[in-house]
């Protein structure tokens, strides 16, 4: 498993600890899996920096998880 995939799994686990119900965990996981690559692509296009793009996507998902 490469380090980016491992980091994605770790971040998903972190986000899921913020969500209460099993139903919401399933919904968030689907959302994360469906949009994380697109969000990174868009962030990379705007920011032109891989690390800042990763940070922006992580911050976005953290905010989404907190408000789920």
Image (cartoon, helix red, strand yellow):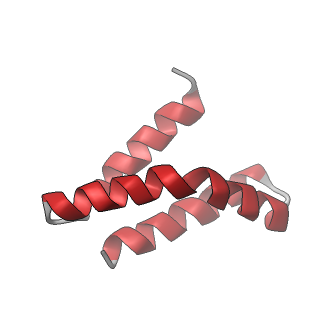
- The residue sitting at 78% across, 58% down in the picture is 44
Of residues 24 and 10, the one nearer the viewer is: 24
- The residue sitting at 32% across, 47% down in the picture is 13
Residue 29 seen in render: yes
Q: Quadrant of residue 3?
A: top right
Residue situated furthest bottom in the rendering = 67
Residue situated furthest top in the rendering = 1
Q: Position of residue 16 (x, y in %)?
A: 28, 55
Q: Quadrant of residue 42?
A: bottom right
* 45 is higher (above) or lower (below) than 10: below
Residue situated furthest left in the rendering = 21
Residue 17 seen in render: no
* 28 is higher (above) or lower (below) than 11: below
Q: Position of residue 18 (x, y in %)?
A: 25, 64
Q: Position of residue 10 (x, y in %)?
A: 40, 41
- The residue sitting at 58% across, 35% down in the picture is 4
- The residue sitting at 39% across, 54% down in the picture is 30
């Amino acid at each position: 498993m490469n380090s980016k995939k491992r980091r994605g799994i770790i971040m998903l686990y972190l986000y899921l600890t913020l969500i209460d119900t099993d139903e919401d965990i399933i919904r968030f996981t689907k959302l994360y899996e469906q949009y994380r690559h697109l969000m990174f692509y868009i962030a990379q296009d705007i920011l032109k920096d891989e690390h800042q793009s990763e940070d922006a996507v992580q911050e976005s998902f953290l905010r989404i998880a907190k408000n789920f």
